Amino acid sequence: MSARPAALRGLPLLQDLGPLEGRRVLVRTDFNVPIDETAGGRVIADDLRIRATLPTLQWLLDQGATVVCCSHMDRPKGKVDPRFSLDIVAKRVAELAPGVEVMENLRFDPREEANDPSLTAELVAGFDAYVNDAFGVSHRSHASVVGPPRFLPSAAGRLLEREVEVLGGLLHEPARPFVAIVGGAKVADKLGVMAALAAKADTIIVGGGMAFTFLAAQGRGVGGSLLDATRIAECCALLEGPAQILLPTDVIALSPGSSFGCEQTSGEVRTFEGDLPDGWMGLDVGPVSAERFADAIARAGTVLWNGPMGVFEDERFAAGTRRIGEAVAATKGASVVGGGDSARAVEELGIADAIDFLSTGGGASLEFLEFGDLPALDALRNAPNAPEA
């Protein structure tokens, strides 16, 4: 097992399950796919999450196992809701992996999110092995995620294995320079992972609404931009830390009292260097900053991107995210994109094929990068068949 990458040591993989001929295997998948409501009924808008787990499902079928998947969809709050039924997913899985069964939405039962042992006992009854291939929920201590490894030989599926291998590589052995790009709206959501990255990355690029709390920490006037005054001290500490932190020096801003977003837009848009006037809201990094960020990305040996540079769903404030996306796609270094909004940006920009690894988990990828572990991984390492670390 010493030949395994550091992040995978002690984690049982599919080959650690032993012979599976004639055995029943429960697979925790993340089939929380987007659904469109049409005149003809419910339609899967994007089946990527289903296709992503096919290598695991097919491997189990090839071993002679009977495969049953369990998953959640959305947040039905512990009640049966036809809008979140997995029947449409079951039909698609039957087309892509004939013979694989799909249980109904786990979150129709309140015991799932409560991590109730009674639900775990019901789930594992009649099964001989368990596989977790749902990285997107592996940061959740839910009954179907952390419970089964206490009772069954268990393993990480191919998708989960790859997520841990790639993201763990960023923490253990990134090619340098290691450049992390962190964006999004809420600085509070990203400070933990930024603190972890500050000890690993050579440069951290900060954009999005969260950048304005950092700018305020430098004494810059941020006008009416998003600001979390309770986090300024933490931003100051990061700015004084070991990693170089690049902040925008110019900002694209919207005039006071205006609207922005996908549909209703109004107001005057200007680019400012230095302080923002009162009431003006910064909604994207400016062109000078975008080019400076792109230069750092071009020199990187490893790039991690999590979070957009601005409100990219409004075309007036999409240029910064677009420029960063182009730079990440063009870099000669290894490129990794976290889930969530940054993954959506990659898809909308049409550069997904140029990215080396696109994570399937938003919150899960952030938590793994911050703590180096997840509840689901800890559960798997304590399964009865787990290898020695």
Image (tube, rainbow, N blue to C red):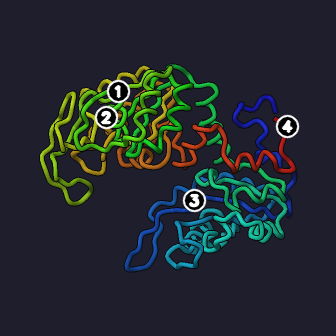
Q: Amino acid at mark 3?
A: Ile
Label 2 or label 4, whichever comes before in sequence order: 2
Q: Is residue 102 left or right of residue 305?
A: right
Q: Which mark is residue 323?
A: 2
Marks 2 & 1, CB-CB < 8 Å contact: yes
Q: Is residue 199 left or right of residue 263?
A: right
**Measured Cα–Cα span from mark 1 to mark 4:** 43 Å
Identify the residue under disc 3.
Answer: 50
For the point 30% across and 51% down, the residue is 313
Label 3 or label 1, whichever comes before in sequence order: 3
Marks 3 & 2, CB-CB < 8 Å contact: no
Label 4 or label 3, whichever comes before in sequence order: 3
Indicate whether 65 appears above or below 109.
above
Identify the residue under disc 4.
Answer: 388
For the point 78% across and 45% down, the residue is 381
Q: Quadrant of residue 22?
A: bottom right
**Measured Cα–Cα span from mark 3 to mark 2:** 31 Å
**Measured Cα–Cα span from mark 2 to mark 1:** 7 Å
Q: Quadrant of the N terminus?
A: top right
Instruction: Point out residue 80 in the picture as x, y percentages from the top left corner.
Output: 58, 79
Q: Which mark is residue 128?
A: none
Identify the residue under disc 1.
Answer: 294
Q: Amino acid at mark 2?
A: Arg
Label 3 or label 2, whichever comes before in sequence order: 3
Instruction: Point out residue 9 in the picture as x, y percentages from the top left corner.
Output: 76, 35
Marks 3 & 1, CB-CB < 8 Å contact: no
Q: Nearer the viewer, mark 3 or mark 2?
A: 2
SS under mark 3: helix
Label 1 or label 4, whichever comes before in sequence order: 1
